[in-house]
Amino acid sequence: MEAGVLFIMVLGLLFLGVPIAIALGLSSVLAIAFFSSDSISSVALQLFTASQNYTLLAIPFFILASAFMSTGGVARRIIRFAIACVGHIRGGLAIAAVFSCMLFAALSGSSPATVVAIGTIAIAGMRQVGYTKEFAAGVIANAGTLGILIPPSIVMVVYAAATDVSVGRMFLAGVIPGLVAGLMLMIAIYINARIKNMPKQPFAGLGEILTSGGEAGFGLLLIVIILGGIYGGVFTPTEAASVAAVYAFLIAVFLYRDMGPLKGVPLRRDGESLEKAILRNLWLTVVNFLPGCFHPETRKVLTDAAKTTIMLMFIIVNALLFAHVLTSERIPQTITDWMIGAGFNWFTFLIAVNILLLIGGQFMEPSGLLLIVAPVVFPIAIELGVDPVHLGIIMVVNMEIGMITPPIGLNLFVTSGITGMSLIQVVRASMPFVLILLLFLVLVTYTPALSTWLPYSLMGPEIITNR
């Protein structure tokens, strides 16, 4: 009875338009006050405990790094490099857009940020060479979802915080599925391009690949810093996130100079020797470091990142309180006993999880939905023998699909905003590619090795205790 009342309260508040954080927190407090043997003082204790979660500290730093890397200059350099690599293939500009989204996903950890940064430039470029606006929008809306699958991913950090699974293993688990998903989108684009005789670019040459790669390299080095630092044992995921935020600030303000006091100042003047250019730029960096920290554009990035962080952390803290109520009332154990008694096994259980998440993803923001569902399904999955890292990747892929399915698909709204298309037009443009991601979901769900081989080869299996 308690479980039914709790879920009815949450769903009722959500349908009334109450923000998800308030719906979770208020339902939890009412459940503790009227149905639980817990003291109401446990609310304060759980909120304090949740806010002290060390893993969650990575989220604001990854959001800040994403905000600095979302400047137009970083995306422009990545797109130039991607076009140089694959633009000469039939449909190459669209394939390059997917490749760019994959690279930018490894910098931002956010799907909307990937759509905005890459889509603003790539869609205009595709339109100029003859692609339809609908096709370009569909490509970007779907490829942008890779922002939460390819590490580092903010959604993976949220899952790790909710289930105590290793962030490092989750990041490694997303590498192969992310590459496979990107490759499936590229193959679909190539086949479509061959059938419809879509345009291709002349081969840019090895020199352009090296030049564009060199320009984009300082931004892409962030991938090496984050993943190399974590798996090289240099720092933890949380420390990696803080290093990434500082590095992204330095790159955006003092190297790429897309913002801040040195905006528009060239790195090297005409006729200037390399030695003089290096010395001059070092001096400019030292002199402008403090002005760069307090520049209006820097403050705007910090403010936007802080707003996003506060919103997400408020949802997370209330969701962890909701998870505490579930655990204290043994609701997951009750559901587990019922499912096992009903004859569910791991195969049918994963079908049920996918259906639940696909439906929920149409109406809720990914992190909020994951925080509601994960505490319920995680103990059941462990009991039925589903690997915890594999379950995490399945949930992330479902969140991807949820971001491009109406009525609340966030990527649809972002794509509509940057293209000027109606939401209905964007939905129609995205649907053919959604079918590819659904096929990918089936592949990930029933091929656990895609998710588990890399993390367990390098870090060993995930050990679950106190479950």
Image: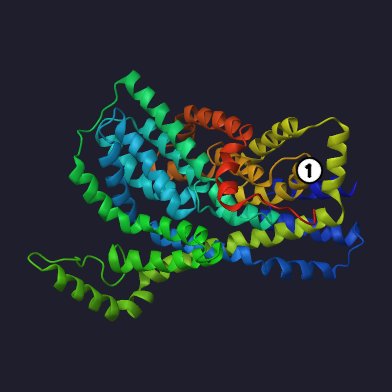
Q: Is residue 109 left or right of residue 31?
A: left
**Which of 270/412 is in front?**
270
Considering every residue shown, the one lying at the far left of the view is: 271
Quick check: 83 above or below 197?
below
Quick check: 438 above or below 327?
above
Q: Measuring 40% from the left and 50% from the top, which residue is drawn there? A: 104
Quick check: 17 above or below 46?
above
Residue 25 lies in what quarter of the image?
A: bottom right
**Which of 386/409 is in front?**
386
Identify which amino acid the numbered label 1 is placed on: Ile
**Which of 61/204 is in front?**
204
Q: Measuring 64% from the left and 55% from the top, which residue is drawn there? A: 160
Pointer 1 local density, CA inside 10 Å: few below 14, some 14–19, many at least 20: many
Q: In this view, does 22 lie to the left or right of 57?
A: right
- Residue 257: in sight, yes or no? no
Residue 145: percent from left, percent from top: 49, 42
The residue that mark 1 highlights is 380
Say which element carries label 1: helix
Indicate how the structure is coloured in the image.
Answer: rainbow
Total residue callouts: 1
Residue 206: percent from left, percent from top: 20, 42
- Residue 223: in sight, yes or no? yes
Q: Is residue 338 left or right of residue 137?
A: right
Residue 201: percent from left, percent from top: 23, 33
Q: In this view, does 64 lie to the left or right of 42?
A: left
Residue 366: percent from left, percent from top: 60, 47
